[in-house]
Image (cartoon, helix red, strand yellow):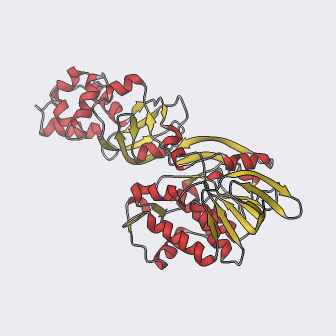
Amino acid sequence: MAITTTDVLIIGAGAAGLMCAASAGYRGRSVTVIDMGKKPARKILISGGGRCNFTNQGSTPNNFICQNPHFVKSALSRFTADDFIELVDRHGVNYHHKTLGQLFCDDSAQDIVDVLLTECDWAGAAIELRTEVLSVSKNAEQGYLVKTSGKDYQCQSLVIASGGLTMPKLGASPIGYKVAEQFGLDVLPTIAALVPFTLHDHDKKRFDGLSGISIDCHVTSENGITFRENILFTHRGLSGPAILQISSFWQAGQAVTINLLPEQNLNDIINNWREQQPQKSLKNLLATLLPKRFIEVLINDGTFTAIVADKAVNQLNHGEIDNLAEALHAWKIKPNGTEGYRTAEVTLGGVNTDEISSKTFEAKKSPGLYFIGEVVDVTGWLGGYNFQWCWSSGWACGQAI
């Protein structure tokens, strides 16, 4: 088979790979991007409910999980959220702001894909789809030889932008980790992150019938990390933004603590009820603060007894009030596990950042080999941070290759 020569070969036509391709192409490099999929950037297309939360205006290094917390600083400072917003503006994409700095397309995530494909086209980068990598080898003088199901490629710079293991139906593959290990790089253990929790059978039975109920909460992990957003009961367990966030900090066997009334002090509320509505039952008054069906579950499972719940608030003693406050401000639940890579938004872990340059993303042990995006041990919070990491790492690598 004839060998196709290119300055840069990028494995993965996702957010990081396409960004890197345009960045390198504009510098006059010949660039080819290969991907197993039928379409480029399939994960972008389904993100944000089809509208793509493409960045976060408040993005800082503190919004990322990495074994080396300093690693992300260089790339994030050199290509910022504002830089990507400027790119989106240049292409005339309409977008809107949501809470907590999140930016979404007004129309469709396809708008972001179109921006990236147009940039690659203008930069002269070629994209080859339905292409499976069969082997990667190093030629001491000429860089890397990559054999695929379509062509064989010889390149000076090989960029791995293959992503993580999330959403296998979209073609997720461990190819990036395998290449890293082949060339002697350390790969940290990977797990699903930004993912819903599943529950033990007894909790599933408790919450049967609550599917679709959403509650604004503080959710705290055992290591003290806290997020304030909604939790959502599902027929499989717990989801919602706060649960997805805390899942990145949760380990098997741990409980999470949920403050169901983050803006209020239940002791103060009950004292106020005792003055203004003394004859009303605790159960009915609590249903003004939290969904009635949820309150009924807490009564039925003994979180607080039916006897207490049926009492008029002026009949509650101080011990009962304190126990109630503890139950609602520090409600503990121990997940059974997570839904795994099938529904996770990102993969935690990956290529150890100690193995690569934070400026160029080149492997220290294998010159000319680069790793960017999700395949690296960098995981952003929910809310556009992971896409920003793809833009920043892809752009920075493109400036170096």
| Residue in the picture at 43% in, 73% down | 93
> Which corner quadrant holds the C terminus?
bottom right
| Residue in the picture at 44% in, 60% down | 52
The one nearer the camera, 272 or 13, is 13
* Quadrant housing residue 46: bottom left
User: In the orientation shown, which residue stands out farthest toward the front?
Assistant: 1
User: In the orientation shown, which residue stands out farthest toward the right?
Assistant: 141
Q: Is residue 286 left or right of residue 80?
A: left
Counting from the top left corner in percent of width and height, residue 282 is at 19, 31
Residue 204's place in the image compared with 143, above or below, is above
* Quadrant housing residue 280: top left
Counting from the top left corner in percent of width and height, residue 33 is at 65, 64
Residue 321's place in the image compared with 86, above or below, is above
Asked whether the viewer can see residue 84, the reply is no
The one nearer the camera, 6 or 74, is 6
Counting from the top left corner in percent of width and height, residue 250 is at 53, 38
The count of marks equals 0
> Which corner quadrant holds the N terminus?
bottom right
| Residue in the picture at 59% in, 40% down | 191
Asked whether the viewer can see residue 257, the reply is yes
Counting from the top left corner in percent of width and height, residue 399 is at 69, 72
